[in-house]
Image (tube, rainbow, N blue to C red):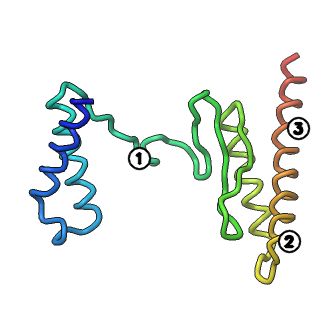
Amino acid sequence: QASAAYMYMSAKHDRDAVKLWALNADEVTAAFDAAKAKALESVGGVAQKKKKRSEQHLPKGVWKVKTGKFQTKIRWGGKQRYIGTFHSLEQASTAYLSVRKDLEDTKQSGFSADEANAAFYAAKKKALGRVYSKRLESSFVSL
């Protein structure tokens, strides 16, 4: 706890030393990150750099989760919607692209919340059917 308190105070001091009111949002974030890294180094820790999405080489709408699987989500109808979790990047990408295509074909203007949900779940069901039918086909080919 003592080292955590020291890290906090060190980061707070460095943060206060910078005139935050004169900086834009990116500069404030950079100043805070630099102060955090300095505080961690002073107690023997190492700051972990979070990879940017472009550095992860994953398609839009696909995230790799701690289990090693790939999760797919899409933003539609004012909400982020969960499509599914898949064993391979190809399956996740296929599901995302399928749902996105089906939803683009659907005109959502004038939809009620229930109609938007129904359209999403129909697209999701269709996409999952495509993904898992391809999976079954490939398993029969390998036999």
Percent position of residue 47, x then y: 27, 35
Mark 1 is surrounded, within 10 Å at the Cα level, by few (under 14), some (14 to 19) or many (20 or more) other residues, namely few
Residue type at the position of mark 2: Glu
Label 3 sits on a secondary structure element that is helix
In the picture, measured across the screen, residue 23 lies left or right of residue 132, that is left
Mark 3 is surrounded, within 10 Å at the Cα level, by few (under 14), some (14 to 19) or many (20 or more) other residues, namely few
Front-lying residue, 39 or 86:
39
- Front: mark 2 or 1: 2
Residue type at the position of mark 1: Lys
- Dot label at residue 29: none
- Dot label at residue 115: 2
In the picture, measured across the screen, residue 102 lies left or right of residue 5, that is right
- Dot label at residue 133: 3
Mark 3 vs mark 1, CA separation in Å: 33 Å
In the picture, measured across the screen, residue 117 lies left or right of residue 68, that is right
Query: Image point 88% across, 44% down: which residue?
Result: 129
Label 1 sits on a secondary structure element that is loop
Residue type at the position of mark 3: Ser
Query: Image point 69% across, 42% down: which residue?
Result: 92
- Dot label at residue 52: 1
For marks 3 and 1, the one nearer the N-term is 1
For marks 2 and 3, the one nearer the N-term is 2
Front-lying residue, 137 or 10:
10
- Front: mark 2 or 3: 2
Query: Image point 57% across, 37% down: which residue?
Result: 64
For marks 2 and 1, the one nearer the N-term is 1
